[in-house]
């Protein structure tokens, strides 16, 4: 019965006994080699605060002169006598980080930095820059443009007739044609209409209409209905704002036949649609 | 580069010195106390109290056992670096402006002020380090082994050249002279800086074969120790108080600024309170480090070339540990040299 002196009963949870008592610090080892230390303390307003720290300890081995190592164990003296190890706040502080980059033309650089101090890194400069497609002015890269196939600049072969001429030549191993033809396109170049990837769509280029002054509320289906009256429409593209999903005011309509496209262009130019007058023209090849 | 600010002094700094291993930094100021700091984290190791006046200068022996300080209370004191005890006091008729240990630590020179009818002198003391176990440090010579009197112009700064072969002194009139430390004869005297522009600092290269002087005439000069030939000139736009040669990279650091009495009337930017980095060989200014609110009184470079510290009129010491761009910078010709 030697434990009688200890008045706390084993069944009592001492956390409830004393409201000012702090729960014990918990240390858990994480799988990634870090430690999570959960400790409790009272802040300035006397409220209990839980502090969770994740600590990663790394061992840095350093070879120092034995005299230097011996000096590290020296006790503090003078005004610092008896103070705890480690820098004290009243004598030591850390200043603002500064960039020191030696350079022969540092004067010009310093003047530049002075002029526009808010100018940050290249990344910050490009942060607000919008991606703009060269083909349809949409908010995507030119390479991702849905009209890449129809509008993309193509060096050779401008007309449908040329396509036919190409067909025979491309069958051989690039014989007769100066450009290289990938094997999977040989013999069927310009063949299957459904094969869009890598195919050439100069033909489409000439049967595509660019429609501008389109209402913000326009729908792709409405445009299709409007233009389908003149012939088979292979594709309707309505440029939309990425965020608001509203139309940006222009569209591309592709016809299967150039004659239909020409007729549509003539009839629909100046057509009133949704309170705005459409302007229709043949899409220009972007170069 | 995040500077460590040491605010242990209440008045302007007069000199700072790293020890030979670079782990300790000693600073003196006009507030009579001497501080020792760990250079790595800016922790203060201790203070050396005992001086009765502004402390003008400090130097530490090469083995970091003894610390010498010279003060406006007309004394040179020798301290036990580890304990902070004063082991020896030498009295002079005038203030002491500069102390320096010889490269082997066996001698200590002290430059005294010219005042009240006394001429400026350079006194040399023999230093002993006790009985091998550093126990009997206070058994030092009472009288200097040599006394050089500067009859023409008082010496303001002095130091030891390679192997302690010469004593090099900078004078108030802008000249630099070379003395024989055995006989005390003046071997050479060169008007290195403009006449009547005081030399404020003189620091040696790591091998002590050449040194840099900083003068009130707004320039710093690199001078050979053996014949006092002027090797390089670094021109600044402000009076210079301190100059230092960086090991590892071929730079020099100059510090200065408007005279302390004009400081309150100028903004920090116009006051030119920056540490200026020049390329040692090409003499081009390659950058500045801002931070002090007053002129830089003293600069010292870590002996390994990885950091430098500056002490200002504003009472702060700032330790800067260099980061990568500092070490990477090279002139095109240097780069080509590297490739070969």
Image (cartoon, rainbow, N blue to C red):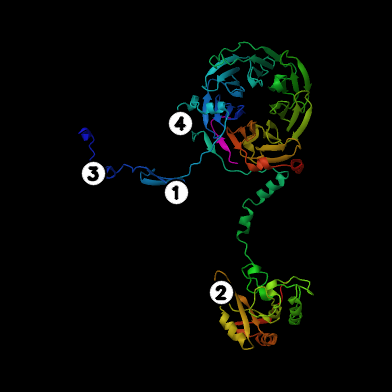
Q: Nearer the viewer, mark 4 or mark 3?
A: 3
The residues bearing labels 1 and 4 have C-alpha atoms spaced at a distance of 34 Å
Question: Was residue B7 drawn as part of the magenta stretch in this picture?
Answer: yes
The residues bearing labels 2 and 4 have C-alpha atoms spaced at a distance of 66 Å
Check contact, mark 1 vs mark 3: CB within 8 A.
Answer: no
Can residue B161 be seen here? The reply is no
* Boundaries of the magenta span: B1-11
Which residue, given by chain and number where applicable, does mark 2 sit on?
Answer: A246
Q: Chain of mark 1?
A: A
Q: Chain of mark 2?
A: A
Are the residues under badges 1 and 3 in a single subunit?
yes
Horizontal relation, residue B219 to residue A30: left or right: right
Task: For mark 4, give the secondary structure.
Answer: loop
What main secondary structure does the magenta stretch of the protein show? loop
The residues bearing labels 1 and 3 have C-alpha atoms spaced at a distance of 34 Å
Are the residues under badges 2 and 4 in a single subunit?
yes
x then y, percent, for residue B154: 71, 19
The residues bearing labels 3 and 2 have C-alpha atoms spaced at a distance of 69 Å
Q: Nearer the viewer, residue A5 or A85?
A: A5
Are the residues under badges 1 and 2 in a single subunit?
yes
Which residue, given by chain and number where applicable, does mark 4 sit on?
Answer: A84
Q: Chain of mark 4?
A: A
Classify residue B282 by image quadrant: top right
Task: For mark 3, give the secondary structure.
Answer: loop
Q: Chain of mark 3?
A: A
């Amino acid at each position: 019965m030697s434990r009688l002196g200890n008045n706390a009963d084993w069944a009592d949870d001492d956390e409830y006994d004393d409201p000012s008592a702090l729960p014990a610090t918990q240390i858990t080892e994480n799988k990634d080699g870090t430690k999570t230390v959960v400790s409790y303390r009272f802040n300035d307003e006397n409220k209990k605060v839980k502090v969770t720290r994740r600590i990663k300890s790394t061992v840095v081995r350093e070879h120092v002169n034995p005299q230097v190592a011996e000096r590290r164990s020296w006790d503090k003296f003078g005004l610092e006598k008896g103070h705890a190890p480690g820098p004290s706040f009243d004598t030591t502080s850390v200043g603002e980080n500064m960039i020191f980059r030696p350079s022969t033309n540092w004067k010009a650089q310093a003047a530049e930095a002075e002029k526009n101090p808010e100018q940050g890194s290249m990344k910050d400069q490009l942060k607000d820059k919008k991606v703009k497609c060269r083909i349809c002015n949409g908010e995507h890269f030119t390479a991702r443009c849905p009209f890449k196939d129809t509008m993309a600049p193509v060096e050779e072969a401008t007309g449908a007739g040329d396509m036919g001429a190409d067909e025979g030549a491309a069958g051989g191993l690039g014989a007769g044609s100066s450009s290289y033809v990938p094997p999977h396109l040989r013999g069927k170049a310009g063949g299957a209409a459904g094969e869009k990837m890598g195919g050439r769509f100069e033909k489409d280029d000439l049967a595509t209409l660019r429609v501008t002054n389109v209402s913000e509320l326009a729908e792709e289906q409405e445009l299709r209905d409007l233009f389908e009256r003149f012939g088979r429409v292979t594709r309707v593209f309505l440029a939309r704002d990425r965020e608001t999903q509203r139309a940006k005011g222009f569209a591309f309509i592709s016809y299967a036949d150039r004659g239909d496209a020409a007729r549509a262009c003539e009839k629909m130019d100046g057509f009133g649609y949704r309170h705005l007058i459409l302007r229709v023209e043949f899409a220009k090849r972007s170069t | 580069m995040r500077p460590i600010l040491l605010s242990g002094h209440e008045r302007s700094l007069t000199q700072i010195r790293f020890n030979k291993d670079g782990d300790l930094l000693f600073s003196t100021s006009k507030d009579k106390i001497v501080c020792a700091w760990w250079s790595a984290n800016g922790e203060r190791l201790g203070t050396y109290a005992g001086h009765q006046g502004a402390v003008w200068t400090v130097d530490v022996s090469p083995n970091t056992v003894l610390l010498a300080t010279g003060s406006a209370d007309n004394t040179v004191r020798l301290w036990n670096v580890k304990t902070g005890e004063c082991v020896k006091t030498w009295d002079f008729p005038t203030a002491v402006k500069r102390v320096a240990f010889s490269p082997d630590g066996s001698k200590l020179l002290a430059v005294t002020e010219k005042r009240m009818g006394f001429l400026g002198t350079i006194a040399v003391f023999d230093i002993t380090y006790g009985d091998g176990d550093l126990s009997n440090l206070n058994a030092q010579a009472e009288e200097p082994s040599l006394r050089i009197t500067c009859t023409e112009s008082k010496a303001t700064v002095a130091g030891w050249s390679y192997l302690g072969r010469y004593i090099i002194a900078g004078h108030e009139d802008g000249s630099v002279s070379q003395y024989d430390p055995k006989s005390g004869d003046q071997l050479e005297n060169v008007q290195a800086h403009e006449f009547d522009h005081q030399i404020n600092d003189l620091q040696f290269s790591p091998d002590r074969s050449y040194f840099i002087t900083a003068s009130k005439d707004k320039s710093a000069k690199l001078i050979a120790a053996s014949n006092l030939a002027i090797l390089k000139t670094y021109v600044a736009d402000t009076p210079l108080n301190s100059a230092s040669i960086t090991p590892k990279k071929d730079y020099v650091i100059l510090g200065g600024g408007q005279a302390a009495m004009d400081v309150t009337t100028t903004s920090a930017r116009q006051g030119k309170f920056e540490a200026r980095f020049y390329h040692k060989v090409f003499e081009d200014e390659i950058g500045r480090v801002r931070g002090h609110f007053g002129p830089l009184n003293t600069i010292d470079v870590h002996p390994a070339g990885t950091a430098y510290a500056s002490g200002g009129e504003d009472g702060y010491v700032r330790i800067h540990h260099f980061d990568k761009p500092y070490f990477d910078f090279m002139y095109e010709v240097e780069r080509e040299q590297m490739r070969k």
